[in-house]
Image (cartoon, rainbow, N blue to C red):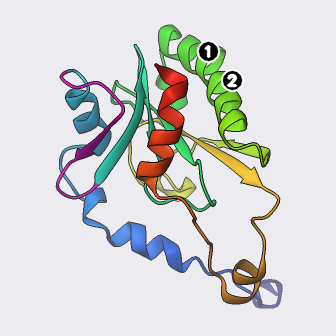
Amino acid sequence: MVEKIFQNYLSAPRRSYFKDKKMFREEKCLFCSTSEKLKKESPPLILDLGFTKVFVIANFKNCFLVVNPYPYVPRGQLQLVTHRHIQGMKELNDGEMDEIFKELITKIQTSLEKEYPMVVGFNIGINYGKTAGQSVEHFHIHLVPRFSSETGFMETTAGTRIVDENPEETMERMSKYFK
């Protein structure tokens, strides 16, 4: 009976790319390394951590804003990351909760809509635990602008997403909203 229910399987070949990357096997957390560097340097900046680059847009009291270096939308995919090394939302303190959810999510969404007027929606997501897709075990929120033009010929026929803006361009475009 079970075999008949699961006749079709979805494949996620992109996951193996992330799973095998050296950046996820480093002893030092890449977000903690970024947080440490932000004590000495001010955004916008590109931090070369050796195994990956981090594109930092803004630094706040409890968190910082970066460009997702492996986006799956054409442009503007960001991550809001806590300075403190915690894994999940239930570990956030009141200051972090207030800053992230009362101040920044709305400000980031508004700035993305201003910079990318063709945005028609958003996904705001938290992956908690490896089985949920959390590849870096440090709390961060994905802010993903959605565009009506996303599903086109390449996505549907070739299983390929077109990303038309590199992370550095996104960092440069978005940093003006957080000075």
Between residues 12 and 120, which one lies in front from this camera angle? 120
Q: Is residue 29 left or right of residue 132?
A: left
Q: Is residue 178 left or right of residue 43?
A: right
Asked if the magenta segment contains residue 49, the reply would be yes
Which residue is found at the position 34% from the left and 24% from the top? 84
Callout 1: few (<14), some (14-19), or many (20+) C-alpha neighbours within 10 Å?
few
Q: Main secondary structure of the magenta part?
A: loop
In the image, what residue type sits under mark 2? Thr
Q: Is residue 167 left or right of residue 84?
A: right
Q: Which of the numbered marks, if any, corresponds to residue 106?
A: 2
Write down the residue under mark 1.
103
Q: State the image coordinates of residue 131 (x, y, percent, origin top left).
A: 53, 58
Q: Is residue 53 visible?
A: yes
Callout 2: few (<14), some (14-19), or many (20+) C-alpha neighbours within 10 Å?
few
Q: Are marks 2 and 1 in contact (CB under 8 Å)?
A: yes
Q: For the residue labelled by badge 1, is the local secondary structure a helix, a strand or a loop?
A: helix
Q: Quadrant of the N terminus?
A: bottom right
Give, as a single range, the part of the protein colored magenta. Answer: 40-52
Quadrant in the picture for residue 106: top right
Between residues 72 and 14, which one lies in front from this camera angle? 72
Q: Which of the numbered marks, if any, corresponds to residue 112?
A: none
Between residues 55 and 25, which one lies in front from this camera angle? 55
Which residue is found at the position 18% from the left and 49% from the top? 27
Between residues 79 and 174, which one lies in front from this camera angle? 174
Which residue is found at the position 68% from the left and 80% from the top? 10
In the image, is residue 117 above or below residue 51?
above
In the image, what residue type sits under mark 1? Glu
Q: For the residue labelled by badge 2, is the local secondary structure a helix, a strand or a loop?
A: helix
Gap in Å between the C-alphas at discs 2 and 1? 6 Å
Asked if the magenta segment contains residue 34, the reply would be no
